[in-house]
Image (tube, rainbow, N blue to C red):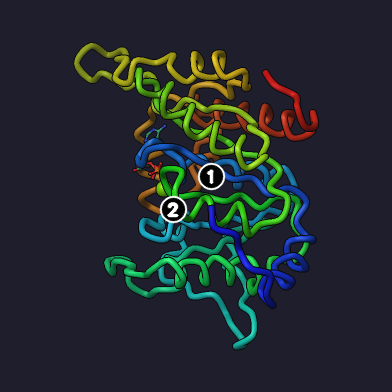
Amino acid sequence: MHKVTIDGAMSRIAENMAKVKYKIVVMSNKGGVGKSSTAVAFAALLSSRGARVGLLDIDIHGPSLAKMTGKEGVLPVSDGKAMDPVRVKDNLVMISVGSLTSRDDMPVIWRGPMKMNILKQFLADVRWGELDYLVIDAPPGTGDEPLSICQLLPGVAGGVVVTTGQEVALLDSMKAVNFLKRLGIRVLGILENMTDFPCPHCGGSVDLFKSGGGQAAAGKLGVRFLGRVPFDPRLLEAGDGGRLFVDTDPDAPAAKALAAAVDAAVDALQAGPGAAA
Ligand SMILES: Nc1ncnc2c1ncn2[C@@H]1O[C@H](COP(=O)(O)OP(=O)(O)O)[C@@H](O)[C@H]1O
Ligand SMILES: [Mg+2]
Protein backbone atom coordinates (compact mmCIF):
# COMPACT_ATOMS: atom_id res chain seq x y z
CA MET A 1 0.00 0.00 0.00
CA HIS A 2 1.73 3.23 -0.98
CA LYS A 3 1.59 6.09 1.48
CA VAL A 4 0.66 9.62 0.62
CA THR A 5 3.48 12.02 1.38
CA ILE A 6 2.91 14.95 3.68
CA ASP A 7 3.09 18.10 1.58
CA GLY A 8 1.35 21.42 1.26
CA ALA A 9 -1.76 19.81 -0.16
CA MET A 10 -2.05 17.53 2.84
CA SER A 11 -2.19 20.40 5.29
CA ARG A 12 -4.71 22.24 3.08
CA ILE A 13 -6.79 19.06 2.95
CA ALA A 14 -6.66 18.72 6.72
CA GLU A 15 -7.75 22.34 7.13
CA ASN A 16 -10.52 22.17 4.53
CA MET A 17 -11.83 18.80 5.67
CA ALA A 18 -11.84 19.73 9.36
CA LYS A 19 -14.96 21.74 8.50
CA VAL A 20 -16.82 18.60 7.42
CA LYS A 21 -18.53 16.68 10.19
CA TYR A 22 -19.17 13.32 8.53
CA LYS A 23 -17.42 12.01 5.42
CA ILE A 24 -19.25 9.05 3.96
CA VAL A 25 -18.00 6.95 1.08
CA VAL A 26 -20.43 5.01 -1.14
CA MET A 27 -18.79 1.89 -2.58
CA SER A 28 -19.46 -1.24 -4.53
CA ASN A 29 -17.35 -3.94 -5.99
CA LYS A 30 -18.97 -3.68 -9.41
CA GLY A 31 -20.15 -0.91 -11.71
CA GLY A 32 -23.77 -0.37 -12.60
CA VAL A 33 -25.26 -1.48 -9.28
CA GLY A 34 -26.55 1.98 -8.39
CA LYS A 35 -23.74 3.52 -6.40
CA SER A 36 -24.02 6.98 -7.95
CA SER A 37 -27.81 6.91 -7.76
CA THR A 38 -27.53 6.04 -4.07
CA ALA A 39 -24.95 8.76 -3.41
CA VAL A 40 -27.19 11.35 -5.09
CA ALA A 41 -30.30 10.14 -3.25
CA PHE A 42 -28.53 10.14 0.13
CA ALA A 43 -27.16 13.65 -0.47
CA ALA A 44 -30.52 14.98 -1.68
CA LEU A 45 -32.41 13.45 1.26
CA LEU A 46 -29.94 14.67 3.89
CA SER A 47 -29.96 18.19 2.45
CA SER A 48 -33.78 18.24 2.34
CA ARG A 49 -33.70 17.44 6.06
CA GLY A 50 -31.69 20.59 6.64
CA ALA A 51 -28.15 19.21 6.71
CA ARG A 52 -25.44 20.99 4.69
CA VAL A 53 -24.23 18.44 2.20
CA GLY A 54 -21.43 18.15 -0.35
CA LEU A 55 -21.41 15.53 -3.07
CA LEU A 56 -18.01 14.49 -4.40
CA ASP A 57 -17.62 12.31 -7.46
CA ILE A 58 -14.27 10.55 -7.51
CA ASP A 59 -15.20 8.13 -10.27
CA ILE A 60 -12.63 9.72 -12.56
CA HIS A 61 -13.23 7.42 -15.52
CA GLY A 62 -17.01 7.25 -15.23
CA PRO A 63 -18.15 10.46 -13.56
CA SER A 64 -21.92 10.71 -13.49
CA LEU A 65 -22.89 13.11 -10.73
CA ALA A 66 -22.84 16.27 -12.88
CA LYS A 67 -25.36 14.64 -15.22
CA MET A 68 -27.45 13.05 -12.47
CA THR A 69 -27.80 16.36 -10.65
CA GLY A 70 -28.63 18.28 -13.84
CA LYS A 71 -25.38 20.24 -13.73
CA GLU A 72 -23.64 18.88 -16.79
CA GLY A 73 -21.58 21.61 -18.44
CA VAL A 74 -21.83 23.89 -15.40
CA LEU A 75 -18.24 24.83 -14.66
CA PRO A 76 -17.28 25.66 -11.07
CA VAL A 77 -16.18 29.27 -10.55
CA SER A 78 -12.48 29.48 -9.80
CA ASP A 79 -10.29 32.42 -8.83
CA GLY A 80 -7.10 30.54 -9.67
CA LYS A 81 -6.55 29.57 -6.05
CA ALA A 82 -9.68 27.65 -5.16
CA MET A 83 -13.02 26.84 -6.75
CA ASP A 84 -16.58 26.98 -5.57
CA PRO A 85 -18.49 23.72 -5.82
CA VAL A 86 -21.52 23.69 -8.11
CA ARG A 87 -24.78 24.46 -6.30
CA VAL A 88 -27.43 21.78 -6.89
CA LYS A 89 -30.15 23.06 -4.55
CA ASP A 90 -30.44 24.58 -1.09
CA ASN A 91 -27.87 22.95 1.22
CA LEU A 92 -26.42 20.80 -1.56
CA VAL A 93 -23.23 21.38 -3.56
CA MET A 94 -21.36 19.04 -5.89
CA ILE A 95 -18.03 18.53 -7.62
CA SER A 96 -17.28 15.92 -10.25
CA VAL A 97 -14.58 15.41 -12.85
CA GLY A 98 -17.58 15.84 -15.13
CA SER A 99 -17.81 19.42 -13.78
CA LEU A 100 -14.30 20.17 -15.00
CA THR A 101 -14.70 19.14 -18.61
CA SER A 102 -17.24 20.78 -20.86
CA ARG A 103 -17.76 17.63 -22.93
CA ASP A 104 -18.99 14.41 -21.43
CA ASP A 105 -17.94 12.20 -24.35
CA MET A 106 -14.24 12.77 -23.72
CA PRO A 107 -12.60 9.87 -21.92
CA VAL A 108 -10.30 10.84 -19.11
CA ILE A 109 -6.86 9.42 -19.81
CA TRP A 110 -4.85 10.26 -16.75
CA ARG A 111 -2.07 8.35 -15.12
CA GLY A 112 -1.86 7.67 -11.40
CA PRO A 113 -0.09 10.89 -10.29
CA MET A 114 -2.57 13.07 -12.17
CA LYS A 115 -5.48 11.23 -10.66
CA MET A 116 -3.95 11.71 -7.24
CA ASN A 117 -3.57 15.42 -7.97
CA ILE A 118 -7.17 15.89 -8.97
CA LEU A 119 -8.32 14.06 -5.83
CA LYS A 120 -6.10 16.30 -3.73
CA GLN A 121 -7.55 19.37 -5.43
CA PHE A 122 -11.09 18.21 -4.81
CA LEU A 123 -10.32 17.89 -1.11
CA ALA A 124 -7.94 20.82 -0.65
CA ASP A 125 -8.92 23.47 -3.18
CA VAL A 126 -12.69 23.29 -3.35
CA ARG A 127 -14.44 25.74 -1.04
CA TRP A 128 -16.76 23.21 0.54
CA GLY A 129 -17.28 25.41 3.58
CA GLU A 130 -18.90 24.08 6.74
CA LEU A 131 -20.63 20.80 5.91
CA ASP A 132 -22.55 18.25 7.93
CA TYR A 133 -21.93 15.54 5.34
CA LEU A 134 -19.60 14.97 2.42
CA VAL A 135 -21.00 12.08 0.40
CA ILE A 136 -18.29 10.54 -1.78
CA ASP A 137 -19.22 8.51 -4.83
CA ALA A 138 -16.34 6.09 -5.37
CA PRO A 139 -15.57 4.28 -8.60
CA PRO A 140 -16.40 0.59 -8.69
CA GLY A 141 -14.02 -1.83 -7.05
CA THR A 142 -11.46 -1.57 -4.34
CA GLY A 143 -8.61 -0.14 -6.42
CA ASP A 144 -6.58 3.04 -6.64
CA GLU A 145 -9.12 5.85 -6.32
CA PRO A 146 -11.06 4.52 -3.35
CA LEU A 147 -7.76 3.66 -1.71
CA SER A 148 -6.25 7.08 -2.44
CA ILE A 149 -9.28 8.97 -1.20
CA CYS A 150 -9.43 6.95 1.98
CA GLN A 151 -5.73 7.60 2.60
CA LEU A 152 -5.94 11.29 1.70
CA LEU A 153 -9.04 12.02 3.66
CA PRO A 154 -8.70 12.36 7.38
CA GLY A 155 -11.38 10.53 9.32
CA VAL A 156 -13.84 8.95 6.91
CA ALA A 157 -16.82 8.38 9.20
CA GLY A 158 -18.31 5.45 7.37
CA GLY A 159 -18.89 3.50 4.19
CA VAL A 160 -22.12 2.41 2.52
CA VAL A 161 -21.83 -0.70 0.34
CA VAL A 162 -24.26 -0.97 -2.58
CA THR A 163 -24.97 -4.29 -4.23
CA THR A 164 -27.54 -6.12 -6.27
CA GLY A 165 -28.99 -9.33 -4.97
CA GLN A 166 -27.23 -11.96 -7.09
CA GLU A 167 -25.43 -14.85 -5.50
CA VAL A 168 -22.14 -13.14 -6.27
CA ALA A 169 -23.38 -10.23 -4.17
CA LEU A 170 -22.10 -11.95 -1.10
CA LEU A 171 -18.60 -12.13 -2.48
CA ASP A 172 -18.81 -8.61 -3.90
CA SER A 173 -20.03 -7.09 -0.67
CA MET A 174 -17.47 -9.05 1.27
CA LYS A 175 -14.66 -7.47 -0.75
CA ALA A 176 -16.01 -3.96 -0.25
CA VAL A 177 -16.69 -4.55 3.44
CA ASN A 178 -13.21 -5.99 3.98
CA PHE A 179 -11.67 -3.07 2.11
CA LEU A 180 -13.39 -0.63 4.47
CA LYS A 181 -12.47 -2.68 7.52
CA ARG A 182 -8.83 -2.88 6.47
CA LEU A 183 -8.71 0.88 6.24
CA GLY A 184 -10.37 1.21 9.62
CA ILE A 185 -13.54 2.75 8.17
CA ARG A 186 -16.82 1.87 9.83
CA VAL A 187 -19.24 -0.04 7.62
CA LEU A 188 -22.60 1.72 7.90
CA GLY A 189 -24.37 -1.09 6.08
CA ILE A 190 -25.19 -2.87 2.85
CA LEU A 191 -27.93 -1.61 0.53
CA GLU A 192 -29.48 -4.00 -1.94
CA ASN A 193 -30.55 -2.17 -5.09
CA MET A 194 -32.75 -2.95 -8.10
CA THR A 195 -34.93 -5.61 -6.50
CA ASP A 196 -38.45 -6.36 -7.79
CA PHE A 197 -37.87 -5.69 -11.46
CA PRO A 198 -41.25 -4.78 -13.02
CA CYS A 199 -42.70 -7.45 -15.32
CA PRO A 200 -44.79 -5.76 -18.04
CA HIS A 201 -46.29 -9.06 -19.23
CA CYS A 202 -47.47 -10.41 -15.90
CA GLY A 203 -48.26 -7.08 -14.25
CA GLY A 204 -46.22 -8.03 -11.19
CA SER A 205 -42.49 -8.09 -10.63
CA VAL A 206 -39.67 -10.50 -11.34
CA ASP A 207 -36.75 -11.33 -9.16
CA LEU A 208 -34.20 -10.46 -11.84
CA PHE A 209 -31.23 -10.22 -9.50
CA LYS A 210 -32.40 -12.89 -7.02
CA SER A 211 -33.19 -10.57 -4.16
CA GLY A 212 -31.94 -11.43 -0.71
CA GLY A 213 -28.20 -11.54 -1.47
CA GLY A 214 -27.52 -8.17 0.15
CA GLN A 215 -29.39 -9.10 3.28
CA ALA A 216 -27.68 -12.49 3.47
CA ALA A 217 -24.31 -10.79 3.01
CA ALA A 218 -25.05 -8.28 5.78
CA GLY A 219 -26.06 -11.12 8.10
CA LYS A 220 -22.93 -13.13 7.37
CA LEU A 221 -20.62 -10.14 7.64
CA GLY A 222 -22.24 -8.85 10.81
CA VAL A 223 -23.06 -5.42 9.38
CA ARG A 224 -26.35 -3.58 9.10
CA PHE A 225 -28.71 -4.24 6.23
CA LEU A 226 -29.90 -0.87 4.94
CA GLY A 227 -32.80 -2.35 2.98
CA ARG A 228 -33.93 -3.11 -0.54
CA VAL A 229 -34.52 -0.47 -3.18
CA PRO A 230 -36.87 -1.72 -5.89
CA PHE A 231 -36.14 -1.14 -9.55
CA ASP A 232 -38.13 1.92 -10.65
CA PRO A 233 -37.92 3.20 -14.23
CA ARG A 234 -38.66 6.70 -12.89
CA LEU A 235 -35.42 6.60 -10.92
CA LEU A 236 -33.50 5.75 -14.07
CA GLU A 237 -35.23 8.49 -16.09
CA ALA A 238 -34.72 11.05 -13.33
CA GLY A 239 -30.99 10.23 -13.25
CA ASP A 240 -30.69 10.53 -17.01
CA GLY A 241 -32.65 13.78 -17.01
CA GLY A 242 -30.69 15.37 -14.15
CA ARG A 243 -33.64 15.39 -11.74
CA LEU A 244 -33.43 14.33 -8.11
CA PHE A 245 -35.73 11.30 -7.94
CA VAL A 246 -36.22 11.45 -4.17
CA ASP A 247 -37.48 15.03 -4.61
CA THR A 248 -39.60 14.50 -7.74
CA ASP A 249 -41.17 11.17 -6.63
CA PRO A 250 -40.93 11.15 -2.83
CA ASP A 251 -43.84 8.73 -2.49
CA ALA A 252 -42.43 6.08 -4.82
CA PRO A 253 -41.50 2.87 -2.95
CA ALA A 254 -37.88 3.23 -4.15
CA ALA A 255 -37.69 6.77 -2.74
CA LYS A 256 -39.17 5.60 0.56
CA ALA A 257 -36.68 2.71 0.70
CA LEU A 258 -33.83 5.17 0.10
CA ALA A 259 -35.15 7.44 2.86
CA ALA A 260 -35.27 4.46 5.24
CA ALA A 261 -31.72 3.53 4.22
CA VAL A 262 -30.56 7.06 5.07
CA ASP A 263 -32.22 6.74 8.48
CA ALA A 264 -30.42 3.45 9.10
CA ALA A 265 -27.06 4.82 7.92
CA VAL A 266 -27.37 7.94 10.09
CA ASP A 267 -28.31 5.71 12.98
CA ALA A 268 -25.19 3.62 12.36
CA LEU A 269 -23.07 6.80 12.21
CA GLN A 270 -24.41 8.01 15.49
CA ALA A 271 -24.19 4.61 17.16
CA GLY A 272 -20.43 5.04 17.33
CA PRO A 273 -17.55 2.78 16.37
CA GLY A 274 -17.94 -0.93 16.75
CA ALA A 275 -21.74 -0.91 16.54
CA ALA A 276 -22.91 -3.58 14.12
CA ALA A 277 -26.28 -4.85 12.90
N1 LIG B 1 -33.41 1.25 -8.20
C1 LIG B 1 -33.21 1.58 -9.48
N2 LIG B 1 -34.24 1.54 -10.36
C2 LIG B 1 -34.05 1.86 -11.66
N3 LIG B 1 -32.89 2.21 -12.20
C3 LIG B 1 -31.83 2.28 -11.38
C4 LIG B 1 -31.93 1.97 -9.98
N4 LIG B 1 -30.70 2.15 -9.44
C5 LIG B 1 -29.88 2.55 -10.43
N5 LIG B 1 -30.56 2.62 -11.61
C6 LIG B 1 -30.02 2.97 -12.92
O1 LIG B 1 -29.01 2.01 -13.24
C7 LIG B 1 -27.92 2.64 -13.91
C8 LIG B 1 -26.64 2.41 -13.11
O2 LIG B 1 -26.76 3.11 -11.87
P1 LIG B 1 -25.58 3.98 -11.28
O3 LIG B 1 -26.12 4.66 -10.08
O4 LIG B 1 -24.97 4.83 -12.34
O5 LIG B 1 -24.60 2.80 -10.88
P2 LIG B 1 -23.03 2.81 -10.51
O6 LIG B 1 -22.70 4.16 -10.00
O7 LIG B 1 -22.90 1.74 -9.47
O8 LIG B 1 -22.31 2.46 -11.77
C9 LIG B 1 -28.29 4.11 -14.04
O9 LIG B 1 -28.86 4.30 -15.32
C10 LIG B 1 -29.34 4.33 -12.95
O10 LIG B 1 -30.26 5.34 -13.27
MG1 LIG C 1 -21.26 5.53 -10.70
- The quadrant where residue 97 appears: bottom left
Residue at 49% over, 49% down: 138
Q: Along the horizontal axis of the image, is 241 left or right of 259? A: left
Whole-percent x, y for residue 34 in the image = 42, 38
Q: Which residue carries the number 2 mark? A: 68
In the foreground, 121 or 135:
121
Q: Which residue carries the number 1 mark? A: 39
Which residue type carries mark 2? Met
Q: Is the residue indicated by label 2 positioned so its CB lies within 8 Å of ligand 1?
A: yes
Q: Along the horizontal axis of the image, is 13 left or right of 189? A: right
- The quadrant where residue 24 appears: top right
In the foreground, 224 or 40:
224
Disc on res. 96: none
Q: Is the residue indicated by label 1 positioned so its CB lies within 8 Å of ligand 1?
A: yes
Whole-percent x, y for residue 140 in the image = 41, 45
Residue at 52% over, 28% down: 191
SS category of the residue bearing label 2: helix
Residue at 62% over, 55% down: 151
Say which quadrant the C terminus sits in: top right
Query: Dot 1: few (<14), some (14–19), or many (≥20) neighbours within 10 Å?
Result: many
Residue at 53% over, 44% down: 39
